[in-house]
Amino acid sequence: MIETVGSVQNFATAVRNLEGLEWLGEFEIDELAPDEDFFNVNSKGEATTKPLVGRLYLVFTNQTALSQLLGLWDRYSSDEKMVWPTGLTSLRDVFKKLHAIRRWSVQDRLVDSGVLKYWEEDLLHAPRESIRTEIELWYRGAPAQRSNAQAEVERIVTSTGGTVLRACEIAGIAYHAILAELPREAVKMIIENPATELVRCDSIMFFRPTGQVAAGDPGMEEPIDSPVDEEPLTYPNGDPVIAVLDGLPVENHVLLRDRLIIDDPDDLASAYPVSDRIHGTSMCSLVVWGDLSEENDPLSRPVYVRPVMRPMDSISTPHPEAMPSDQLTIDYVHRAVRRLFEGDAGDAAAAETVKIINFSIGDRSRPFLQMVSPLARLIDWLSHKYGVLFVVSAGNQLAGIDVGVTRAEFEDMSEAQRNDLVIRVLYENSRHRQLLSPGETINGVTVNSIHQDASGYGANGRHFELFTTPLPSPVSSFGSGYRRAIKPDIAYPGGRVLYDFAMLGNSVECSARRSKPGHRTASPGALPGENDRSAFCRGTSNSAALLSRELAGAYEVLQEILAEQVADVDADPFISPLLKAMLVHSSEWGLAGDRLNEILANAVPSRGLRLAVSRLLGYGIPDIQRVLECTGQRATVLGFGSLEEGKGHSFRLPLPVGLAARKVPRRLTVTLAWLSPIAPTNQRYRSARLWFDLKGNRVAKERQEADHHAVRRGTVQHEIFEGADAIPITDGDSIAIKVGCRSDTQPLGAPINYALAVSLEVKEGLNIAIYDEVLATLRPAVEVPARSRVR
């Protein structure tokens, strides 16, 4: 492992020229601690404690190559003007920035992955004679190398008395792993003395706990709510557009009966008691109906449901739900999605019409720190391969929050003071509240939670809200994403959460009660045969499920628009990018962003304030109806296309003459979205880099909200511009929006599908016919017609 401060160009080429070294991958790393050799300086040239950014280069080596590499390093250390061997001069640039060079170690394989903590818990609480673990291998370039590496690990596992249950290779994400059962004594030996043959095996990258991709703890402190009313006699028809990968729902619940297509090829239902079907029932209820407190109409199409969780062994009831521990999570999710679009075991594709996959579960053992997790890589790869949009929850943070004051002091504070305190404490501890895998996905839409619902106030007794305004929920996770891209993408109401002070200290703890406040959803009954019950739940899972429901409505409207405007074009390959663009396009920070800016202004340097707010809100809170319907003072247009590497498209937005010489506030919003192929062993990771530039934008020049550098690092570029100057406009004036495409890694093998959304608006009620003027001159983009509100 070679760790540098800063990046080194062409290092991969230098490594490939050194005989005996095999390129495995590279990663960008943040927050390297400064030392006497490497540090940032301030404006006065003084050393600071600001963390550094570097790269991690991973190579597989034999002893000869390692000796040669270390020999070069020793020679360079004593003589920086040494003559370099032919083909290795790029290593000189590496050595100038070298921070560390060492073997991949026990620390990397065990400690940093957190598996030791889970093993210790299993040994303490679980009576099983063996412990399951995922062993992730280095992904070697040649099939023979992978086969030999797997055989070596299997031999060592067997020598400990263990068993290999499964193995999985997925070339598209550079993933190779086995699922093994190790005897209790073998695990105890590793914990006591990690330097065992298994842990020292050079073919192994990580040991990871199994069964950690899970729903949040549902709790059951209070009785479930009263029965729901009988559902209306309207049932869905047509092909499913949404798939839910989650726990098994209560299929015959009065609110879900005949509304779900449940596909359970592994027969999880046979060992899934109805009383444990909490999370899947809640998520399906939110997707189909939304929050029951709001009395929405159900979706017009059925929802495809693939159960991928089951009850865990636990003394608590209902049992927590998680991915099966006898499966490799990556393999299990891969097979579930492949079954959707390709089928398996001789079956036809299960639901190839699906465009949105709701994934409201996360890996609590994998907070995002440096490397993109295998599960996020899988979602990114599947997104691009099948042209499907994943909606992913950011992950719940249920640990206590040390607010640093007593209950009495907290109760004496004003609401504004409480908000200030809690947000600052959360931000200061943001490193311990990172996105949970797969929340760092670059192609999926990652959703954080807003502390908001329609249940009515539900605090009582010792329980209270940390704040009562619609700020980011205290259980939300913090971004950014890989290479400091905007993550989460958006935030959405996830239900209000109540807290209580711990018995000792100044920590407040999250309540797990299933009564108000929160979102009201369908729920298993307390007694057999009860199929009409509801309960309240909350968290980022809810936010993602509600967003998936919104996208289902947007899909129906989008189909109408495309049929009206471009009936002769096969728009199906562009549906997912269009939905992604429309969703983000409707987002803004709003009042929550204003409040966060106020609170964090004294804690964050002004140049970093936009990044700080986006770590909680992403691009903001969406109101997708703003894209689905235009008004007289707002025009929204959609465009889409495919771009080859090095090519570009140009769109023109006509400027309304009614704005000429008018000093009125206006806003221009532009959103570009795509699904990128990935290069899993390259630190850039994202293969397709698309972007837009504006030419001739005189109506709104001031950038708002998200940082204009960060918006170009993911697969959505969303920018808001505002202005109010009086400017001359004549017939034919327009804004040119140029979309470009480049490769960030290897050459792109195929064109990249993208979608573009553009809105121009002024304040409602002004006598400026933005919509009519744009409509009269717009060609050839897709115009979004004015329409009534669509559920």
Image: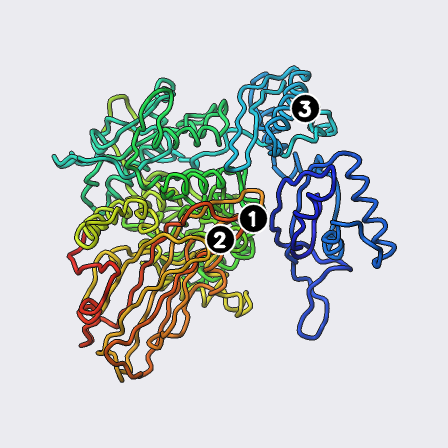
- The residue where tag 1 is placed is 432
54 lies above or below 300: below
The residues tagged by marks 1 and 2 sit, at their Cα atoms, a distance apart of 24 Å
Q: Nearer the viewer, mark 1 or mark 2?
A: 1
Q: Residue 407, labelled with which disc? A: 2
User: Where does the N terminus fall, quadrant-wise?
Assistant: top right
Q: Residues within 10 Å of mark 2 (few under 14, many from 20)?
A: some
First along the sequence among labels 3 and 1: 3
Q: Position of residue 791 (x, y in %)?
A: 20, 49
Q: Residue at x 50, y 58 (%)?
A: 409
Q: Residue at x 27, y 50 (%)?
A: 454
Residue type at mark 3: give it: Lys
Q: Nearer the viewer, mark 2 or mark 3?
A: 3
Q: Are marks 1 and 2 in contact (CB under 8 Å)?
A: no
Q: Position of residue 380 (x, y in %)?
A: 45, 42
Residue type at mark 1: give it: His
Q: Residue at x 61, y 24 (%)?
A: 147
Is disc 1 placed on a helix, strand or loop?
Answer: helix
Q: Position of residue 674 (x, y in %)?
A: 39, 51
Nearer-the-camera pick, 260 or 718: 718
- Give left or right: position of 161 versus 403: right
Q: Position of residue 636 (x, y in %)?
A: 26, 62
Is disc 2 placed on a helix, strand or loop?
Answer: helix
- The residue where tag 3 is placed is 188
